[in-house]
């Protein structure tokens, strides 16, 4: 069996994969799934998948999900186009740490992002924050405190404003608030993570006075340097992350960038 060529990022927040996805084998997909469980985010470098091959590869991880806020690609209903033009001003789509669509009852488990067009090197990076590491680093009393708490996640949380620019041209109509409750501590293959999307969490269930204090504490803890990695895109690169074990954030930049996104239920 041909093994996957991989290398962890310097602080083990994620993992680079150098195997060509055009010729990836069934057993290698299992190995990729293990790496995804271990690292939370994978960066597939030097790839050249066309939209059908990209959709095909993503379907190994589950069923493509519908994104309620944007219309899909005209020819490929599983792909959502995230585009920023040189002339765009203001924040990038998805700026501010978050986990995708966590306001839904069943948020997508995984997100894929493929770089179709990228600006100059150093611009348009995506930041990732590993929530396995963030959980492990919490003091014991904080772990105990949040163990059984649930957060209130809203589509109108902080990150909603970064969506507006994208929704002018690609948005769906009818964007009333969507809200869900989720446990703040989740478990993947026995490893615990903090599941608190700073862009969406607006409250904590059954907690009165110290709600905001706790949200603020977690939000700043979750994105500490030790758990974070800034990924610089090259054309063709694909990132795949687990929304239950990673936070991510777009960054502001000036330039043309086009990304194809697929989320997996
Ligand atoms: Fe996102």
Image (cartoon, rainbow, N blue to C red):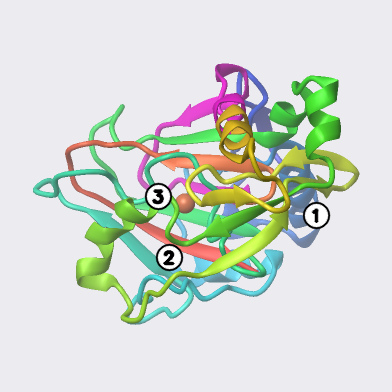
- 5 vs 113, left or right, is right
Query: Between residues 173 and 205, which one lies in front from this camera angle?
Result: 205
In the image, residue 103 above or below residue 75? above
Q: Is residue 228 magenta?
A: yes
Q: Do the residues labelled 1 and 3 touch (CB within 8 Å)?
A: no
Query: Magenta residues?
Result: 219-242
- The image quarter in which residue 215 lies: top right
Query: Between residues 73 and 49, which one lies in front from this camera angle?
Result: 73
Foreground tag (3 vs 2): 3
Image quarter of the C terminus? bottom right
- 251 vs 101, left or right, is left
- Which residue is pictured at 34% across the width and 64% down the height? 81
- Which residue is pictured at 39% across the width and 38% down the height? 233
The residue singled out by tag 1 in the image is: 30
- 88 vs 131, left or right, is left
Which element is circle 1 on? helix
The residue singled out by tag 3 in the image is: 159
Instruction: Measure the alpha-carbon separation of dots 1 and 3.
Output: 34 Å
Local crowd size for mark 3, using a 10 Å CA cut-off: few (<14), some (14–19), many (≥20)? many
Instruction: Measure the alpha-carbon separation of dots 2 and 1.
Output: 22 Å
Instruction: Give percent across and percent down for residue 174.
Output: 35, 81
Which element is circle 2 on? loop
* Res. 130 visible in picture: yes
Instruction: Give percent across and percent down for residue 8.
Output: 66, 27
The residue singled out by tag 2 in the image is: 50
Instruction: Measure the alpha-carbon separation of dots 3 and 2.
Output: 31 Å
């Amino acid at each position: 069996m041909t093994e996957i060529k991989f290398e962890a990022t310097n602080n083990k927040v994620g993992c680079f994969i150098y195997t060509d996805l055009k010729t990836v084998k069934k057993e290698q997909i299992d190995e990729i799934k293990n790496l995804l469980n271990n690292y939370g985010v994978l960066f597939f470098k030097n790839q050249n998948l066309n939209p059908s091959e990209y959709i095909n590869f993503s379907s190994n991880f589950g069923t493509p999900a519908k994104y309620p806020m944007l219309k899909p690609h005209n020819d490929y209903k599983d792909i959502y186009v995230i585009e920023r033009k040189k002339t765009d001003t203001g924040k990038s789509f998805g700026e501010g740490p978050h986990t995708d669509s966590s306001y839904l009852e069943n948020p997508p488990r995984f997100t894929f992002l493929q770089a179709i067009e990228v600006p100059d090197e150093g611009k348009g990076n995506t930041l990732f924050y590993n929530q396995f590491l963030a959980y492990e680093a919490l003091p014991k009393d904080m772990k105990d405190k949040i163990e059984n708490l649930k957060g209130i996640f809203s589509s109108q949380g902080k990150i909603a404003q970064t969506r507006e620019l994208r929704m002018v041209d690609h948005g769906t109509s009818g964007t009333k608030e969507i809200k869900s409750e989720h446990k703040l501590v989740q478990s993947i293959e026995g490893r615990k993570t903090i599941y608190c999307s700073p862009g969406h969490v607006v409250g904590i269930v059954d907690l009165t006075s110290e709600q905001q204090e706790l949200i603020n504490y977690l939000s700043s803890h979750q994105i500490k340097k030790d758990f974070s990695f800034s990924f610089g895109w090259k054309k063709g690169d694909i990132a795949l992350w687990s929304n239950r074990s990673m936070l991510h954030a777009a960054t502001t930049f000036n330039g043309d960038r086009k990304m194809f996104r697929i989320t997996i239920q």
